[in-house]
Image (spheres, rainbow, N blue to C red):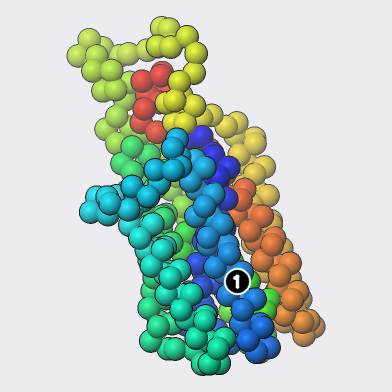
Amino acid sequence: MHPAVSVIFFTVASGAGFGLIFLIGLGFPVGGGSGQAFLISLIGGGLAVAGLLSSTFHLGHPERAWRAFSQWRSSWLSREGIAAVATLMLFGVYVLYWMLIGVRLTVLGGAIALGAALTVFTTSMIYAQLKTVPQWQTLLTPLVYLGFALGSGWLLAASFGDHGAPELWGIVMIALAWAAKWMWWARAGRARLGDLGSSPETATGLGFIGKVRLLEKPHSGDNYLTREMVHRIGRKHARTLRRLSLALGCGVPITILAIAGATGAPPMVNLLAALSMMAGLLAERWLFFAEAEHAVSLYYGHR
């Protein structure tokens, strides 16, 4: 699949934003009064909104994005939009009350946490429900999305919160998220288009004749399908990006958290870990799309 920059940024930024909103809703300790409350809420809401807005750039007609909300019965994209808007609206009320009154409403916070988790889940299901992409169609996909959202959100929350330096929690969250991703990679390496019952013979409907091979391309140039659904990446480049994502997204954050826990460094040090993890997730998410094989590629000679 073609790795669109707007979608990559969307999934990483909104995941971190809603992960932070999830923790705020659950009552993650935040010191510093209303100013600190506004800052951490602005970061969470800002990342979520920026990610959602960036996703519209991948649409052919962004001005028609509002129409997606009407397809909630059958579309995970529509459910994602509804969950995101509802969560952000409730979050706005929650933050306003928090800043003005100085009290965090527990019931409303629980609803916001649930909405944030549902939003990330619906985002992941846009890909996990696709039967035409065997690498994505697994329960590990939503598990990875939720794990990375929680891990990156926790690092952002720990950068501004007054939490007593529970660095071990962050290390465990990040390690578990990447363990899930490692299992996802292992499964994706074994997944084949043939697992779907698809082949060039079924794609062309000519299997009754015998084995089908491509003689000439069906188009003299690229079209939408070849640009968006058929993408090749060399194994060498894939391995390099995988190591980079592991180093930035896992190794560096865990190292920073371990040093901070041992030395009693200020919470703002965790911001470096958060930025590093998000940089690693950009590489991870690029591979998520680039290495995926869509069944339509069978029509263009891919086996």
Return the residue at label 1: 42
Question: Quadrant location of residue 210?
Answer: top left
Q: Is residue 179 visible?
A: no
* Residue found 73% across the figure and 67% down from its top: 272
| Left or right of 256 on screen, residue 233 | left
Question: Quadrant location of residue 250?
Answer: bottom right
| Left or right of 160 on screen, residue 137 | left
Look at the picture and state if 41 lies above or below 238.
below
* Residue at the top extreme, as displayed: 215
Q: What residue type is labelled 1?
A: Leu
Element assignment for label 1: helix
* Residue found 38% across the figure and 39% down from its top: 133
x, y percent for residue 231 = 51, 30
x, y percent for residue 218 = 40, 11
The crowding category of the residue bearing disc 1, from other C-alpha atoms within 10 Å (few below 14, some 14 to 19, many at least 20), is some
- Of 257 and 187, nearer the camera is 257
Question: Quadrant location of residue 247?
Answer: bottom right
* Residue found 37% across the figure and 63% down from its top: 83
- Of 100 and 188, nearer the camera is 100
Look at the picture and state if 201 lies above or below 85.
above
Q: Can residue 280 be seen in this view?
A: yes
* Residue found 58% across the figure and 64% down from its top: 46
* Number of numbered discs on residues: 1
x, y percent for residue 156 = 63, 71
- Of 15 and 40, nearer the camera is 40
